[in-house]
Image: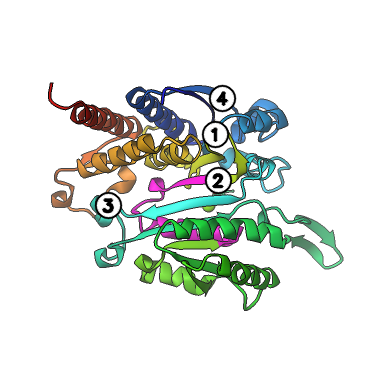
Amino acid sequence: MGGTYRLAAIPGDGVGPEVVEAARRVLEAAGNAFGFGVEWIEVVAGGAGIDAYGAAIRAEDVEAAGAADAILLGAVGGPRWDDPNARVRPEQALFALRGGLELFANLRPVTVHPALIPSSPLRPELLAGVDLLIVRELTSGLYFGRPSEERVTSDGRVAVDTLWYTEAEIRRVVRLAFELAQGRRGKLTSVDKANVLATSRLWRKVVDELRGEYPSVVVGHQLVDSCAMLLVKQPAAFDVLVTENLFGDILSDEAAVLAGSLGMLPSASLGERRTAHGRFGLYEPIHGSAPDIAGRDVANPLGTILSTAMLLRWSLGLEAAAHAVEAAVGAALDDGFRTRDLVPAGATSADLDGLRHVGTRAMADAVIERISIRRAAATSVAAGPA
Ligand code: IPM
Ligand code: MG
């Protein structure tokens, strides 16, 4: 391998800086083990951007981040910037990046590590075999539709948000979902609210128009309300789900309960743009800034660390390194390392036997140690007996 890659780090707010720092150390360890280097540019954004520049993110920083090979982001937001009347909000940084860089497809894989089955409030038999991928449309829908504002009218205050989708916006994300389903178990569930919404009926038509091009994929339509129920009732029945922006936001937090904690889930946001190494993308955990636990070295870094594995795979084409990071996370969990969000609620001391309660940094250390060990083992096997 041996290349050097240019990555943008956007730590953001709350626990963002801690989990990004942890993930950067893991990437560095993967680089040492697999022989590649990373050059970082750092971007101040979110509430931190508002404090520094009066804007959630500056246009030149969106451009600089967009010129890197990929972006690693922590989280943005917090009570300090939560004034409902504020004109600038930390979340605008996300929308400037997602929209500005046309990262229209947000991939949120949900798997259940066997060691974390007790960490989920769901019954263990429901969790066996859960391996699903939510593909969330990320640059349109209610998040981007205009008008979106509050007005004072003769009826008092009125607020409006606009739900808008063009067929091209639907087609490109649904197409990617079909392709991903083809490479997995060949099952695609398109989630909508076609019994109520015009945008959902257009969504369904586009899905049905594309299905002929992907004969190996079995497609089903599911209304979002019943999908929310089925996600906890029979989660193992799902393979790839594709849905519009807001539904995807909600369903992915729900699906995080399967994985044992919101802190476990990674995400990749992809567009059409390709770099010399792969697909340009933005990688972030799906959890938020968790201001209540910020700065205390207790946040779970695994969602961000697993996001770097997706970065290695999708944007840098380094599949072996991606796999090594994921395997090291699995090994750390098998060896009992748990941040506090992963300790089962109401656990007895017998349940906790053999578990090692660790903070953010120590969890990253556990992963790093297991990357090096596994790499060393693989190298000595490849080299054969001396
Ligand atoms: C997510 C988050 C964001 C979203 C928030 C922070 C604006 O919940 O990435 O899922 O709604 O997209
Ligand atoms: Mg969300």
Residue sitting at the far right: 154
| Residue on which the image places disc 2 | 269
Report, in whole angstroms, how far the alpha carbon at label 1 lies from the one at label 4. Answer: 12 Å
Q: Which quarter of the figure is the C terminus placed in?
A: top left
Residue stretch rendered in magenta on the structure: 243-268
Q: Does the magenta portion include 266?
A: yes
Q: Does the magenta portion include 360?
A: no
| Residue on which the image places disc 4 | 42
Q: Which numbered disc flags the more N-terminal residue, 3 or 2? A: 3
Instruction: Give the image quarter of residue 325.
Output: top left
Q: CB at mark 2 closer than 8 A to ligand 1?
A: no
Q: Choose mark 1 or mark 4, whichever is in front.
A: 1
Q: Which numbered disc flags the more N-terminal residue, 1 or 2? A: 1
| Total count of labels | 4
Crowding at dot 2, Cα within 10 Å, few <14 / some 14-19 / many 20+, comes out as many
Q: Choose mark 3 or mark 1, whichever is in front.
A: 1
In the displayed structure, 167 sits above or below 361; it is: below
Q: Which numbered disc flags the more N-terminal residue, 1 or 4? A: 4
Residue at the image position 70 percent from the left and 72 percent from the top = 198
Whether residue 116 sits left or right of residue 180 in the image: it is left
| Residue on which the image places disc 1 | 70
Q: Which numbered disc flags the more N-terminal residue, 3 or 1? A: 1
Report, in whole angstroms, how far the alpha carbon at label 2 lies from the one at label 4. Answer: 19 Å
Report, in whole angstroms, how far the alpha carbon at label 4 lies from the one at label 3. Answer: 33 Å
| Residue on which the image places disc 3 | 116
Report, in whole angstroms, how far the alpha carbon at label 1 lies from the one at label 2. Answer: 10 Å
In the rendered image, is residue 304 in sight?
Answer: yes
Viewer-proximal residue, 75 or 84? 75
Q: Which numbered disc flags the more N-terminal residue, 4 or 3? A: 4
Viewer-proximal residue, 64 or 323? 323
Q: Amino acid at mark 3?
A: Leu
Q: Amino acid at mark 1?
A: Ala
